[in-house]
Image: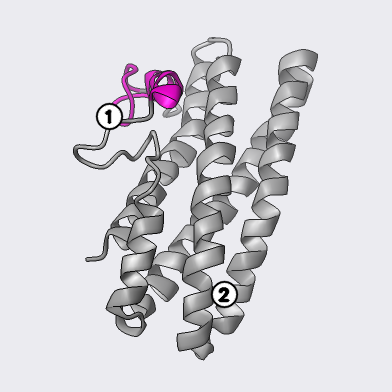
Amino acid sequence: MPLAVRVIRAEHDALSAMLRTLPLLLEAQRRAGMPPDFGALRAMLFYVDEFPERLHHTKESELLFPKLRALAPELRGTLDELDADHAQGERAIRELQHTLLAWEQMGEPRREKFEQQLRVYTVRYLNHMRREETELLPRAMTALSAADWAELDEAFGSHVDPLAPRAGQPVDEAYALLRQRILAALPAPLGWGPALPDVTPHP
């Protein structure tokens, strides 16, 4: 399997795990009467903005998608929609960061808006990644040449996602603290923190 595909899937897996766990973590903290860790929440949203939005999406839109437009014309409608998702994603993460700041500064009345925006963002992002993996990557595997994959492998292998580092490739020292902050806040087994407390309603 090409390195680019492995990187895309690994980065999708890391982001999916974080996005799926974040609402559960907030709910568990609320039920336990624990205050939200705004520092950790800011770190998570910064990570999404810094890596998936700016690096991962840019390489897909500027390198992978144009190759598929040329070689798989039946995917052009899908590619247009996914490109639009990429463009909208940058605005959405900035809005989510702003809403988090409003909650932190203005208190609990702003919590509901943040959690609603987070739910919408998560559903859209998970659907976006699912479409890439089920509609684009299988077709890319058959349509792209060895030269195409060599170019994509070089591009996608040129950065190290702090939540999805490859074997033998250390996380950039500049992002080591960010990785530590995020993984420490996430519950086991995804992070270094304790497992989520039981949030199942009891009679």
Image quadrant occupied by the C terminus: top left
Left or right, 132 with respect to 2, comes to: right
* Image height of 190 relative to 198, above or below: below
Residue underneath mark 1 = 189
Q: Position of residue 98 (x, y in %)?
A: 75, 30
Please state which of residues 143 and 21 is positioned toward the viewer in this rendering: 143
* Whole-number angstrom distance, CA of label 2 to CA of label 1: 34 Å
Q: Is residue 174 above or below residue 7?
A: above
Quarter of the image where one finds residue 3 = bottom left
Residue located at (47% from left, 59% from top): 129
Q: Position of residue 125 (x, y in %)?
A: 55, 53
Above or below, 31 against 59 in this view is above
From which residue to which does the magenta span run? 173-195
Q: Which residue is mark 2?
A: 79
Please count the marks in the image: 2
Quarter of the rendering occupied by the N terminus:
bottom left
Circle 2: residue type: Leu
Q: Residues within 10 Å of mark 1 (few under 14, many from 20)?
A: few
Residue mark closest to the camera, 2 vs 1: 2
